[in-house]
Amino acid sequence: MYPKVNQNIMIDIKSHNQTFRSIIAEVGEEEILISFPLDRKIIGLLPEGSLVDIIYMVDENQYKFLSKIIGRKTDTIPLCRISKPLEKEIIRIQRRDNFRVNSHLLLMINENRLYTINISAGGILFSCGLEMELQQGELVLGTLILPSIKRKDTAIIPFQGQIQRINVLKNLDRKNIALKFTEMDNRDQMKIVQHCFERQRQSRLTR
């Protein structure tokens, strides 16, 4: 399943342990055009011939394919030309709910200041006190504060979620709650995917 025009994607430059977000501008017969990153440092990591993984989401799944930088195109915005794979070369990574990393992020739900235990593009696990009233199946509105690991900018991500599981830790007077995202902007989901990749890389470097 190929990505569609205007779809948000993530580009993983394995040789430099760098990722950045982009958008599909055009899908042709033999090549795909994507928006070029504005960060000059990243541009320098993408000479012609560079191999990259293109990662994107369709419904509940993540897909990726290996591609090559084959040139640039000048349009109203700078575009990067990448090779188009055969459809059979596109790999479904896994259900997004399973792509999960440990991450301690600030979270606001019903005006309560909380912190995540782990996160994926599909949902979060967070901890709260026993006094916070939440029921399994309940829909809640929240805001996730997602700082970039490598940069100073912070993303404020609003979402709607549904409580999936509640695990009471009586010895700690707390409970762990699993929440599934039910409504979230696709661009924000890709920010979470990028955060997960960066966290994975960071954990490998500290081993």
Image (cartoon, rainbow, N blue to C red):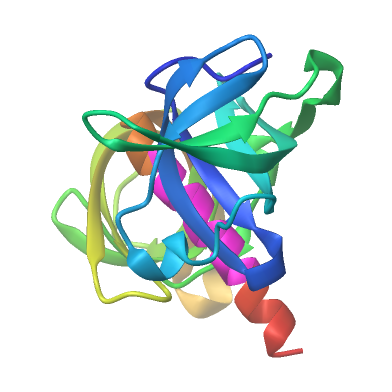
Name the spot of residue 9 as percent of width and height, x first: 49, 36
Q: Residue at x 80, y 30 (%)?
A: 91
Name the spot of residue 84 as percent of width and height, x first: 68, 24
Where, by quadrant of the figure, is residue 129 drawn? bottom left
Q: Please say if 156 is above or below 23.
A: below
Task: Report if residue 170 lies within the magenta region.
Answer: no
Q: Please say if 91 is above or below 48.
A: above
Is residue 131 shown to the viewer in this render?
Answer: yes
Which quadrant: the C terminus? bottom right
Q: Give the left or right position of residue 119, taking residue 142 as reference.
A: right
Q: Residue at x 67, y 49 (%)?
A: 52
Q: Residue at x 64, y 9 (%)?
A: 29
Name the spot of residue 179 as percent of width and height, x first: 47, 42
Q: Give the left or right position of residue 29, taking residue 141 as reference.
A: right
Is residue 164 shown to the viewer in this render?
Answer: no
Q: Main secondary structure of the magenta part?
A: helix
Q: Please say if 77 is above or below 154.
A: above
Q: Front-most of 48 and 88?
A: 48
Q: Which residues are magenta?
A: 189-200
Name the spot of residue 188 as percent of width and height, x first: 34, 42
Outermost residue toward the right in this view = 88
Q: How many labels were placed on the picture? A: 0
Q: Give the left or right position of residue 53, taking residue 164 as reference.
A: right
Q: Front-most of 92 and 24?
A: 24
Q: Front-most of 26 and 206?
A: 26
Task: Report if residue 195 lies within the magenta region.
Answer: yes
Q: Please say if 92 is above or below 104.
A: above
